[in-house]
Image: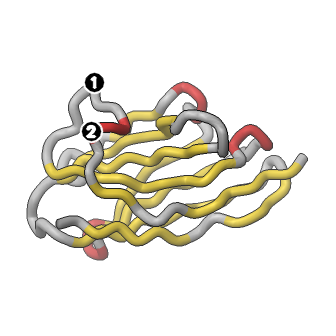
Amino acid sequence: QVTLVQSGGGSVQAGATLRLSCTHSGYPGWGKCMGWFRQVPGKEREGVARFHTHDAIPYYYDVVKGRFTVSQDKSNNTLFLQMNGLEPEDTAMYYCAAYVGFCRSSVTDNDFIYWGQGTQVTVSS
């Protein structure tokens, strides 16, 4: 069992910066594929980034490339999503997700087994 606890988020003006956190527990020592997703009511969930806790190589989906950065604090089992240059289109509920194993290139949100509680990000123009 992997537990994910999210923090961060909030309401900001366009151009602002926010950082989301996701603290994971369970399967100590095992590599986990971690994902950040977002969803707007009435729309499909959208991939933001993914990151493997062992190889620490991030992958960003096109909608956030160059603006968002994923990092981790391994000592505290915490994943971060640094969001710079926020745009109103970034408004969504953001979720952290995980599964134990390698990040496959073909991974989709359906592959992620464990999910955080979600945190709202609202960007006004």
Asked whether, in this view, residue 65 is left or right of residue 123, the answer is left
Query: Furthest residue to the bottom?
Result: 76
**Circle 1 sits in a helix, a strand or a loop, which is it?**
loop
Colour mapping? secondary structure
Q: Position of residue 55 (x, y in %)?
A: 20, 45
Residue for point 45% across, 48% down = 36
Q: Is residue 17 depicted above or below 68 in this figure?
A: below
Residue for point 17% across, 66% down = 1
Near mark 1 (Cα within 10 A), the count class, few <14, some 14-19 or many ≥20, is few
Q: How many labels does the image show?
A: 2
In front: label 1 or label 2? 2
Disc ID at residue 1: none
Asked whether, in this view, residue 22 is left or right of residue 41, the answer is left
Residue for point 55% across, 45% down = 38
Judging depth in this view, the residue of 122 and 19 nearest the camera is 122
Asked whether, in this view, residue 19 is left or right of residue 35, the answer is right
Q: Is residue 82 depicted above or below 65 in this figure?
A: below
Asked whether, in this view, residue 58 is left or right of residue 39, the answer is left
**Circle 2 sits in a helix, a strand or a loop, which is it?**
helix
Q: Position of residue 109 (x, y in %)?
A: 37, 38
Task: Specify the amino acid type for callout 2.
Answer: Asp
Q: Where is residue 39 in the image (x, y as percent from the top left)?
A: 58, 44
Judging depth in this view, the residue of 56 and 63 nearest the camera is 63
Q: How far apart are marks 1 and 2 (CA)?
A: 10 Å
The first of marks 1 and 2 along the sequence is 1
Task: Specify the amino acid type for callout 1.
Answer: Ser
Q: Residue under circle 2?
A: 111
Q: Where is residue 17 in the image (x, y as percent from the top left)?
A: 70, 56
Near mark 2 (Cα within 10 A), the count class, few <14, some 14-19 or many ≥20, is some
Q: Residue under circle 1?
A: 106
